[in-house]
Image (cartoon, grey):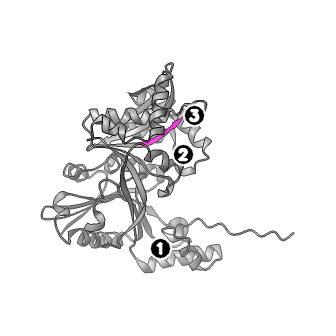
Amino acid sequence: MNIQTLDLQNSLWRETLTKLNHDAYHLPEYVSLEAKRTNTIAKATLISEKDSIFFVPYLLRSCDDLIPATNTRLFDIVSPYGYPGILLNEAAKHDPGFPDRAIKEFQQVLQSQRVCSAFLRLHPILSDNFQTLFASDLFTENGQTVSVDLTLDEDKIWAHTRKGHQSTINKCMRLGLVAKTVPVAQHLNEFLAIYNETMERVAAKDLYFFSHEYFTNLLKLEDKLHLGVVESDGQIVCASLFFECCGIIQAHLGGTKTEFLKQSPFNLLLHHMRLWGKERGNKFLHIGGGVGGKKDNLYTFKSGFSRQRHQFLTLRLIVDRDKYNYLVNLRANNLDIPPETLLKTNFFPAYRAVYHREVKNHN
């Protein structure tokens, strides 16, 4: 096997992607901005054997915040925000045993980098058959996501839309709301105002708040980044960013002005984007799932636009058991709790689990 660890300056990263069906999440520009946002190091591992290719981008994250001031240097790896994960070319998918051999080599690569664990989110569409290609117990199922099949004709796409959503879309059009795709740079500030208002309204976790610099850097994706909006009398009342790559339209981040929530303009926006994406020859509009993979209200809303579902998988890999246990024990000691308490949280890696000690009232 030929095994290489790539950094952002290595032209092989982009060259490899030309041989693989991929999404915007795998692009060096995207991984670079995620590394900057999270104070991590952007890396990718490329493993090939004959015509088979295994490729995965990731963020190398220091564990220094968990370790006392010593000379010990440990790391873990995580995915950039979204759905990056592992890519296999067609030859790899038809090469029995190659995926599992590649995973073992990948683990050796990580061990050489003093990595103790890996948490990777897989792409629900591009990893569609991974549970049959890799060892059956390798991945964790995290619920389902929804996508619209853009290869269907428009009548069938409409027929697969929940009746309530159909009524809302028709109502929006009767009210004179207009959905369109507009240049991102020209309307970035309007989008930011709507997005931030939405996140504050729903009391979103810090994970879902991004700096102005983050969105400015997204413009480096150029023709792979689009902004869909809904206007009322020329005023943008609803907006969302979308990626477009290799036949996949991917909903990224979006929101609606509070005063227009009753009109539900986001229904009209998604309807517009699926027709827009179909006209451009794409195969999927992936709109994701519920928060944390749950079948919550967000999932219920998204599921009304299509009958097509995908399994969302994660890879939770303990690369070095001794180093992993060392960090779990260290964190538990700092919290003055048994290590088993962290392990029972089901958070991965356990040494980064958010633990809130129960406060008892002694009055």
What numbered label is drawn on residue 327? none
Please tell me in which quadrant of the rendered image residue 252 appears: top left
Q: Is residue 255 magenta?
A: yes
Apparent side of residue 154 relative to residue 242 in the rendered image (left or right): left
Find the distance from the CA under tag 3 to the CA under tag 2. 20 Å
The answer to whether residue 30 shows anywhere in this view is: yes
Which residue is the site of mark 2?
209
Q: Amino acid at mark 3?
A: Leu
Q: Secondary structure at mark 3?
A: helix
Find the distance from the CA under tag 1 to the CA under tag 3. 52 Å
Nearer the observer: mark 1 or 3; the answer is 3
Q: Point out the residue furthest to the right here.
A: 363
Residue stretch rendered in magenta on the structure: 252-257
The answer to whether residue 223 shows anywhere in this view is: no
N-term mark: 1 or 3 = 1
Q: Amino acid at mark 2?
A: Phe
Which residue is the site of mark 1?
72
Most frequent secondary structure within the magenta stretch? strand
**Residue sitting at 48 percent across and 23 percent down?**
174
Characterize the local packing of mark 2: few (<14), some (14-19) or many (20 or more) Cα atoms within 10 angstroms: few
Residue 208 versus residue 61 in the image, above or below: above
Q: Is residue 29 magenta?
A: no
What numbered label is drawn on residue 261? 3
Q: Amino acid at mark 1?
A: Thr
**Residue sitting at 65 percent across and 66 percent down?**
356
